[in-house]
Amino acid sequence: MPSAPDPARLSLNTATVKAQWTLAQAIEGCARHGIRGIAPWRDKLAEMGVKQAASAIKAHGLTVSGLCRGGFFTAKDWKDDNLRAIDEAHALGARCLVLVVGGLPPGSKDLAGAREKVKAGIAEVLPVARQAGVPLAIEPLHPMQAADRACVNTLEQALDLCDALGEGLGVAVDVYHVWWDPKLEQQIRRAGRQRILAFHICDWLVPTRDLLNDRGMMGEGVIDLPRIRSWVEAAGYGGAHEVEIFSERDWWQRDADEVLRAMKDCHRRAC
Amino acid sequence: MPSAPDPARLSLNTATVKAQWTLAQAIEGCARHGIRGIAPWRDKLAEMGVKQAASAIKAHGLTVSGLCRGGFFTAKDWKDDNLRAIDEAHALGARCLVLVVGGLPPGSKDLAGAREKVKAGIAEVLPVARQAGVPLAIEPLHPMQAADRACVNTLEQALDLCDALGEGLGVAVDVYHVWWDPKLEQQIRRAGRQRILAFHICDWLVPTRDLLNDRGMMGEGVIDLPRIRSWVEAAGYGGAHEVEIFSERDWWQRDADEVLRAMKDCHRRAC
C-alpha cells in the first residue's frame, strides 16, 4: 500500500458542487473546510468575473489546480474560445488549462479527421499558451464520450500528441476516464513528472446509470484509487488531487457543505 | 469507398430479436428473409434444445457464425459452463465460441487480478476447444463494461492474450465495442485473417441513453461502418457480418420481421 494521501493536496473541481454553489461560494467553502485547491469551470468564472475571482482566490490562499476547460477544437468558434481560456488561466495563475478536445462534428463519422483537427487546433494555440506560461493539459476522455465530447480517449493517444507537439503540453489524468485501460500504469510512467499536469479523482459506480452525470465519490465504486495514485506519484507527480464528480442523482442533490466534508473524509479513507 | 457489402454474409445474432422470438422462430425468420447466417445465444439454445436447434439450422442451410457466449472466467462456475459451451458450439458447427470474459468479481477492485484470472481460465479450456475444433473468439468489450462484463477492453489487449496462449484463439471484432479505438486499424491488421473469427455490426447512437441496451441499427449512429469493414476485409476476413443489436427502447419493441427487413436494408446501404 502507498502512504496515506496528503490532505493538503485536495482540490475542489467546482463541477462537484455546480448545482449548489456559485464560484464565490465554492471559494469560501474551500477556505471554510480547509481545502487548499480549487479548479473553476469557466461558466462559473464568467458569472463571477475573472478579476474578482482571481482576487478572492488569492485572498483565501487557494491554489488553482486547473481551469476547466478549453478544447472543443471541432466546434466552430474554437480558436477565439481557446485564446480567451488561456487568458483566463493566466489571470488565475492556474497550474494548467484542461483541454476537453471535442468529438465528431455534427453529421460526421470521420473520427480520424476529427483527431487531425484536434491536433492542428492544439498546435495553433500552443505557442500562445507557452507565451502566457499556461501549460495545456489534454484530458483523454472515456471512450463512451468519443462521439460527443472528446476524440482523444487514451493516455497513450494523448501522449502521442504531446510527443508530436512538444513543450508546454501535458495530460490531465482523470481516473474516471482511464481506470479501465490495460496500459494505464505503463503510460503514466511514460508521461512522467513533466507531463502529468493534473490528477482528477472520483469513482466508477456499478451500475452506471448515465454516461455523463453518474460518477461516484471516492470509495463508492470500483476504481483502485490508491493503486493509481501510487503510479502517478511514482512518476513524480506532486500536484493536487482534484475531486471532480458529475452526479445528477446524488451529490448534486446534497448540501454542498456535506459534499465537501465527504470529499475530505473519502480522500483520507479511499485514495 | 470499399465495394458493396455482400448480402450473403449477413448473419442474425439472436440478441437482436431476443424480446420477440424464440430460436426456432429466429431460424425460420432467417430462412424466410434469405439471411444465411445465425448466431444463437445459449439461453435461447437451451430453451429449444441443442439437437433440435442443430437439425433445424442444418435443414435451413444456415451457417452458425458464432455461439454467444462462453467466458465469465471471474465467476464461480466458469469452468463447467465453458466446457458445456464448447460442446454446444461443436454440436452446432459454430465458426467460433464468443468469449465475454467477465469483469471484476463482486467486491473486488483488482482489475489486474481479474485479467490474470481471465488469462488462466482461457489457457485451461483452450486445449479442450482445440480438441473439439471450436475456435475461441475473445470479444473485447467497450471500456464502459469493464467492471461488470469484460475486463478485456481493446483489440490490442485481446491480441496480446492470443499471442501468449497460441493456436485456436482469436478475436471477435464488434464495431460497437472498438469503433472509438485510435489503434483500431493497426490492431485489425495485426489480428489478420487467422485471428479475426467474427465481425459484429450495429451502430453507436448519440446520445446513448443506456450503457448496455441502447445500440442502433447500422446507419443510425456515428460508426463509419464501411471504413471498418474495409480494414477487416483488407486483413483477409471473409466471414459473416453478424448483426447484434441490444435495443430496449427501439428494436426490441418492433415486429421481428420488420427488424430483419431493416437489417438487410441497412446492411446494403450503410455498411
Image (cartoon, coloured by chain):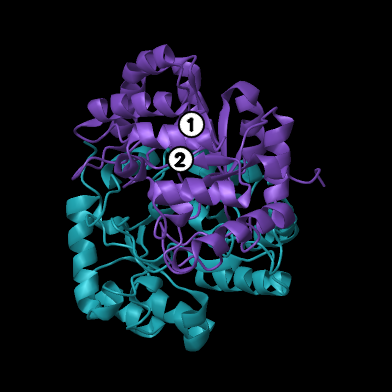
Chain colours: A cyan, B purple
- Where residue A167 appears, as percent x and y from the top left, is 65, 46
**In the picture provided, is A117 more to the left or to the right than B161?**
right
Q: Tell me the quarter of the picture where residue B19 sits.
A: bottom left
Amino acid of disc 2: Asn
Instruction: Kindly tell me whether residue A182 is visible in this rendering.
Output: no
Q: Which mark is residue A152?
A: none
Query: Is the residue A174 above or below the residue A83 in the image?
Result: above
Quarter of the picture holding the N terminus of chain A: top left
Residue toward you, A195 or A15: A15
Q: Is residue B220 visible?
A: yes
Tell me the subunit letter for badge 1.
Answer: B
Instruction: Name the kind of residue labelled 1 in the image.
Output: Gln
Q: Which residue is painted at 45% across and 40% down in the image? A: B153
In the rendered view, tell whether residue B104 sits above or below residue A118. Answer: above
Secondary structure beneath dot 2 equals: loop
Q: Are marks 1 and 2 on the same chain?
A: yes
Marking on residue B157: 1
- The image position of residue B18, as x and y in percent, is 41, 55
Closest to the observer, A58 or A116: A116
